[in-house]
Image (cartoon, rainbow, N blue to C red):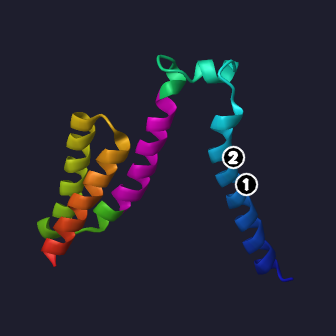
Amino acid sequence: MSGAGLDFWAAVIAMAVITYLTRALPFLLSARSRLQRRLAEGSSLAALGPALLAGIAAAVIVPDLMALRGAAEVAPYAGGLLATALAARRLGNTGAAVIVGVAVYGVLMAAAG
């Protein structure tokens, strides 16, 4: 097998392991676990999840915004971000806020042509 083929399979296996761990770890941590208690609300580690989401969002959105020219191209991004922020504040549910933001972004993109 060539080096490129091995790199491909190594990446696939790494993604599979990471995907498995992100889904299995919450079930593997018992309610009496010290780590689980440290991650409970009120600790400084409780902000880690939202901080990671914000960092990933910034890494994806900022380069796209920097490449845009004109208000017509920026409007769907701005509308989607505003809708997401308002929905998160109003609903208190991150998942629902993301769905609302994506829907508003899609409608504005379709309207822009």
**How would you classify the magenta stretch by its main secondary structure?**
helix
Quadrant (top left, top right, bottom left, bottom right) of the N terminus: bottom right
Residue beneath the point at 71% across and 67% down: 12
Disc 2: which residue: 21
Residue furthest to the right = 1
- Whether 79 is drawn above or below 37: the answer is below
Residue beneath the point at 25% across and 51% down: 81
Question: Marks 1 and 2: CB-CB under 8 Å?
Answer: yes
Using a 10 Å C-alpha cutoff, classify the residue at mark 1 as few (fewer than 14 neighbours), some (14 to 19) or many (20 or more). few
Q: Is residue 76 left or right of residue 97?
A: left
- Whether 81 is drawn above or below 86: the answer is below
Per the model, the C-alpha gap separating discs 1 and 2 is 6 Å
Residue beneath the point at 67% across and 39% down: 25
Magenta highlight on residue 50: yes
For numbered disc 1, what is the local secondary structure?
A: helix
Using a 10 Å C-alpha cutoff, classify the residue at mark 2 as few (fewer than 14 neighbours), some (14 to 19) or many (20 or more). few
Q: Nearer the viewer, residue 29 or 3?
A: 29
Residue 17 location in percent, x, y?
73, 54
Q: Is residue 65 left or right of residue 110?
A: right
Q: Which residues are magenta?
A: 47-63
Three-letter amino acid code of the residue under disc 2:
Leu
Residue 90 location in percent, x, y?
21, 35
Residue 13 location in percent, x, y?
75, 63
Q: Is residue 34 left or right of residue 77?
A: right
Query: On the image, which quarter does residue 5 sit in?
Result: bottom right
Disc 1: which residue: 17
Magenta highlight on residue 54: yes
Query: On the image, which quarter does residue 54 sit in?
Result: top left
Quadrant (top left, top right, bottom left, bottom right) of the C terminus: bottom left
Residue furthest to the bottom = 2
